Image (tube, rainbow, N blue to C red):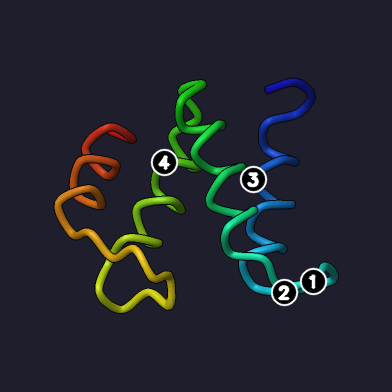
Amino acid sequence: MRGDQDACVGVAIAYDRGEGLPRDPERAEGLMQGLCDDGHAEACVVLAYHYLPSSSVQSQNPAKAAALFDRSC
């Protein structure tokens, strides 16, 4: 990952919500995963919400969400 990580989080959130960019949850998830892997705590938190049962993402996984929340701490 290169550039400003906070800006990348903003782009990923925009893709996730379809705000100013076409809605693309898969692309948002990929961006967040890369940022989280690079140690960006906020990206891990946002990604964790993707795996909660209340999420619209197909791959709901509460255990993975919990692990990501823990990782962000």
Q: Quadrant of the N terminus?
A: top right
Which residue is labeled 4 in the image? 44
Q: Quadrant of the C terminus?
A: top left
Task: Give the distance between the C-alpha atoms of the residues marked 3 and 4, in whole angstroms.
Answer: 10 Å
**Res. 22 mark:** 1
Of the pair 59 and 69, the residue shown nearer to us: 59
At 76% from the left edge and 28% from the top edge, which residue is drawn? 4
Residue flagged by tag 2: what amino acid is it?
Answer: Gly
Which residue is labeled 2 in the image? 18
Q: Is residue 57 left or right of residue 53?
A: right
Nearer to us of marks 3 and 1 is 1
Q: Secondary structure at mark 1?
A: loop
Q: Quick one: label 1, few (<14), some, or many (20+) residues within 10 Å?
A: few
Task: Give the distance between the C-alpha atoms of the residues marked 1 and 2, in whole angstroms.
Answer: 5 Å
**Residue 52 x %, y %:** 27, 66
The mark nearer the N terminus, 3 or 4, is: 3
Q: Quick one: label 4, few (<14), some, or many (20+) residues within 10 Å?
A: many
Nearer to us of marks 4 and 1 is 1
